[in-house]
Image: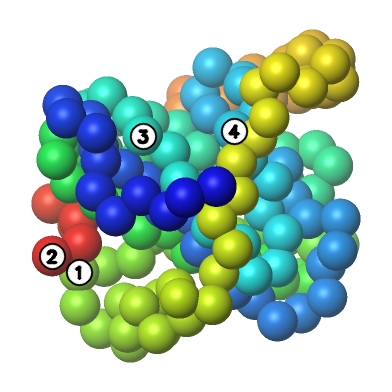
Amino acid sequence: MPRQTAPPPGKALINIHYANSKPKTEGFNLWDGQGHLVGKLRTHTLNQLAVDPGDHLLIAGDGEPQVVLKVSTQAGRVYDVKADYDTGGEFGWKVGVDVLLIPVPTTGPLRDEVTRNESDLTTVAVNRAAPTLQKQEAASAASVRKVIADFTTGPYKDRLTVLAADQYRH
C-alpha cells in the first residue's frame, strides 16, 4: 500500500506507528469508535487513517480491547500516535500485556524517535473486502462498545488519553 504523506482534501490523517522491536507476531487489533476494525498493529508497521475533522476514538487490545485514545483532528493536518505494549504496569487493567497508544507531541524525544523510525515501517491496511472481517467485527462489537463506554463515561474515563487538535506534525 502506498504511504500517504498528506491527508486527502478536507480530511485529517492519523498515523499509528508500531516500531517496537519486541516480538509480538500476532499483533494487536485496532478499532475505531464505531467498532470497525481499522488496523492490525504488528511490529514495524504503519497504519494510516484518513478521517473527517473532529474527535475520533482509537481502541486497541490484545484479544480484548483495553486502551482508548481520543484524537481531535483538524482538516489538512497529520497526527502521529506511537503504539507499544508493556507486560505490566499502570496503563491498563488487564493482567498480562497492556497495549499503549501514545500521543506524539510536536517536539521532543518521542517526536524524534517516531521521525527516525518512520522510514523503516511497512505501511499496512485492513482489507475491507475480506470475508472474515465482518465476523471479527461482529464478534468484538459488544466488547468494543463496553470499552468505549468505560473510557468515555464509565469507571475508566480518567484513563482516556487525548491527542489534541493542535498536536499535529509540523
Q: Residue tagged by mark 4?
A: 38
Comparing marks 1 and 2, which lies closer to the viewer?
A: 2
Q: Closer to the N terminus: mark 3 or mark 2?
A: 3
Q: Identify the residue under disc 2.
A: 170
Q: Quadrant of the C terminus?
A: bottom left
Q: Which amino acid does label 3 sit on?
A: Ala
Could you say whether the residue bearing mark 2 is in a helix, strand or loop?
loop
Specify the amino acid type for callout 4: Val
- The x, y position of residue 127, in whole percent, is 68, 30
Instruction: Name the residue that disc number 3 marks.
Output: 50
Mark 4 is surrounded, within 10 Å at the Cα level, by few (under 14), some (14 to 19) or many (20 or more) other residues, namely some
Question: At 45% across and 33% down in the image, what residue appears?
Answer: 57
State the residue position of label 1. 106
Badges 1 and 3: C-beta atoms under 8 Å apart?
no
Q: Is mark 3 on a helix, strand or loop?
A: strand
Of callouts 4 and 2, the N-terminal one: 4
Q: Residue 115 sits in which quadrant?
A: bottom left
Q: Can residue 135 be seen in this view?
A: yes
Mark 1 or 3: the one toward you:
3
At 14% from the left and 40% from the top, the residue drawn is 76
Q: How crowded is mark 3: few (under 14 residues within 10 Å), some or many (20 or more)?
A: some
- Which secondary structure lies at badge 1? loop
The answer for how far apart the CA atoms under marks 3 and 4 are is 11 Å
Separation (CA) of disc 3 from disc 2: 17 Å
